[in-house]
Structure formats: C-alpha cells, structure tokens
Amino acid sequence: MKESVARFWREIPQRYNIIGNKCTVCGRVFFPPRESCPYCRRKSLGKMQKIQLSGKGKIVTYTIIHSATEDFEDQVPYPIAIVELDEGPRITAQIVDCKPEDVKIDMRVESTFRKIRQDGSTGAIYYGYKFRPMR
Ligand SMILES: [Zn+2]
C-alpha cells in the first residue's frame, strides 16, 4: 500500500498543471478560477472557460521569510514571491532551487510540483506548486 502511494507521486509530471479560467467576454484570466468575471459581472456568467496556465511568469515582488511555523522551520530563510503569470493572474508562492539572495524582481520563473509539508503525526505529505528560476 505504502509503495503504491510513493509510485503514484513519482509518476506525476514534474511541471504541475495550474488550472485557471478565462472570461470569454473580456479575455481576462483568473487564478484561482472564479465563477464570474469581476469586470463583466453578470455578462460573464456561464462564459468562464477553464484553461491550463503555462506556469511561467516573473517575480513582481518578494520577501524573505526568516521565522516560520514548526512545519516550515527546517526551510528558513526562504523567499516567498508574488509571481505574475504570463497569462496575467498573480500567485503567491515559495521560490525554490536558488539562494534567497539570488531572487530578483522581474526574474523569470516557472512552476514546479513539490512537497509542501509533511504532517509529523500521520506522516501524510502535502504537495503543491512552487516556483523556480527559469533556465
Ligand atoms: Zn470579463
């Protein structure tokens, strides 16, 4: 049982799909997906289309976290950034695979699917997206 769970996670593509949606009235893209577009309001009801985002974008602003809750203690210091995706929406996420001092505004980044934290008592591992410098 335990082994099949591990295999399941290994087989997940490295680049996690970020699903947002698009208002087909004005073309704006949202993440997380919304039921209606705040610009078009009623006109957009039923006209929101699910889309897969590229996961590529740039850092708009960032901060370095020096103290964290117990779950993240072993990772400090680490950078958290607001990333503006190429499609427009902004996401707050951890930046990985580079030193905190190497994070720069306007730096190109891409999403990557990573372990977020492990529950100490149950051993459950939570996954989600983080961003790393684009090569
Ligand atoms: Zn709209």
Image (cartoon, grey):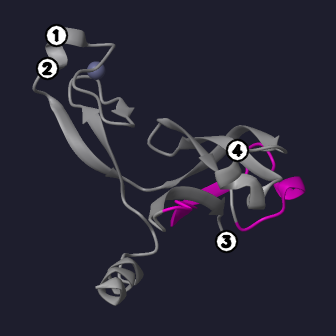
Q: Tell whether position 103 is magenta.
A: yes
**Residue contact between numbered discs 1 and 2, judged by CB atoms under 8 Å:** yes
- Mark 2 and mark 3: Cα distance apart in space: 39 Å
Please state the total of marks drawn on the protein image: 4
Q: Which residue is denoted by mark 3 in the rendering?
A: 135
Q: Secondary structure at mark 2?
A: loop
Q: Secondary structure at mark 1?
A: helix
Earlier along the polypeptide chain: callout 3 or callout 4? Answer: 4
Numbered range of the magenta stretch: 97-121
Q: Amino acid at mark 1?
A: Arg
Residue in the picture at 70% in, 50% down: 70
Residue 44 image offset from top left, x and y in percent: 18, 19
Within 10 Å of disc 4 (Cα), the crowding (few <14, some 14-19, many 20+) is few
Q: Amino acid at mark 4?
A: Thr
**Residue contact between numbered discs 1 and 3, judged by CB atoms under 8 Å:** no
Q: Which residue is denoted by mark 4 in the rendering?
A: 69
Task: Identify whether 105 is placed above or below 27.
Answer: below
- Mark 3 and mark 4: Cα distance apart in space: 31 Å
Earlier along the polypeptide chain: callout 4 or callout 2? Answer: 2
